[in-house]
């Protein structure tokens, strides 16, 4: 199993540009999570999906952020327009829901820099 | 979300056991105790989880107090590769409410 795959690994973009981060969860997992990590705020949950349906998006910072999961093997997190304060490492994770507290598997993250 | 309390940092000598404590006095009956670690420049990594009984796996052991208000992650023989931030997290076991909320964790330093 290749694990959770995120792309790109690094992204540098100019303020105002649209950014799309991609995630492929582990095959068979039915829950998917997007996190953001900064030095100031640590790891923050942005949104999570169960069976491709968004369950909790209360962590999404503002309307500039949107996430989709069109099928069980793919999710995107989009920022439009991007701002320097969006610079962070974005992690995607997946798990098998309903497994009585089973663990998450995280991807290697996308380091986003907005200049 | 029920909250956990961990020391900000700990140090341990290489090849010695490490006991990482976690307090979770407001734990509810459906909360599982999860431990993750994050090595430098990597994503968090699942370590172990449990509900009421002590648990062992190839990475670590989890000792859970009888009243479940505290737990201890045990690394039996620390190596330099175990230097990481360790997070103790309570996860609701109910389907559809399984999000993990990370705190600040314990930064473990291994001394050669």
Image (spheres, grey):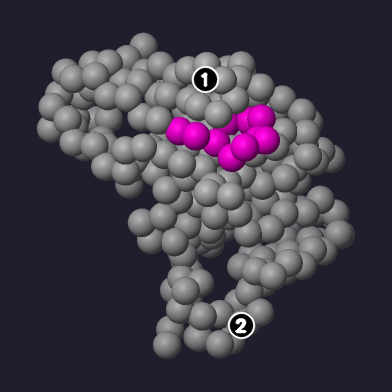
Image coordinates of residue B24 in percent, x first then y, are 69, 50
B1 sits to left or right of A7: right
> In the picture, which quadrant includes the C terminus of chain B?
bottom left
Mark pair 1, 2: CA separation: 42 Å
Q: Position of residue B63 (x, y in %)?
A: 77, 66
- x, y percent for residue B72: 69, 65
What secondary structure is marked by label 1? strand
Q: Is residue A23 above or below residue B58?
A: above
Q: Are marks 1 and 2 on the same chain?
A: no
Residue that mark 2 sits on: B77
User: What is the quadrant of the N terminus of chain B in the image?
Assistant: top right
Corner quadrant of residue B17 = bottom right
- Which residue sits at x=55%, y=36%? A25
The chain to which mark 1 is attached is A
- Give the number of the disc on residue A69: 1
Q: Which residues are magenta?
A: A23-32
Foreground of the two, A16 or B64: A16
**Residue at (63, 59) in percent of width and height:** B47
Q: Secondary structure at mark 2?
A: loop
Mark 1 vs mark 2: in front: 1
Residue at the (27%, 24%) spot, across then down: A19
Q: Is residue B45 visible?
A: yes
Q: Is residue B102 above or below residue B10?
A: above
Q: Residue at x 60, y 20 (%)?
A: A52
């Amino acid at each position: 199993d290749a694990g959770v795959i995120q792309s790109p690994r690094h992204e540098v973009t100019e303020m105002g540009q649209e950014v799309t981060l991609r995630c492929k969860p582990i095959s068979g997992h039915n829950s998917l999570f997007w996190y953001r990590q900064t030095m100031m705020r640590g790891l923050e949950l942005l949104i999570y999906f169960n069976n491709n349906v968004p369950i909790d998006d209360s962590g999404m910072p503002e309307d500039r952020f949107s996430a989709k999961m069109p099928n069980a093997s793919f999710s995107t997190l989009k920022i439009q327009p991007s701002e320097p304060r969006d610079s962070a490492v974005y992690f995607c994770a997946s798990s098998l829901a309903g497994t009585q507290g089973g663990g998450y598997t995280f991807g290697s993250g996308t380091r986003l820099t907005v200049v | 979300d029920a909250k956990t309390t961990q020391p900000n940092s700990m140090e341990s000598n290489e090849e010695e056991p490490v006991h990482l404590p976690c307090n979770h006095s407001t734990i509810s009956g459906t909360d599982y105790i999860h431990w993750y670690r994050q090595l430098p420049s990597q994503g968090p990594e699942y370590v172990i989880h449990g509900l009421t009984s002590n648990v062992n796996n190839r990475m670590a052991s989890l000792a859970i107090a009888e009243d479940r208000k505290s737990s201890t992650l045990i690394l039996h023989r620390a190596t330099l590769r175990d230097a990481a931030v360790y997070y103790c997290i309570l996860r609701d076991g109910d389907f559809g409410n399984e999000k993990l909320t990370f705190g600040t964790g314990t930064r473990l330093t291994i001394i050669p």
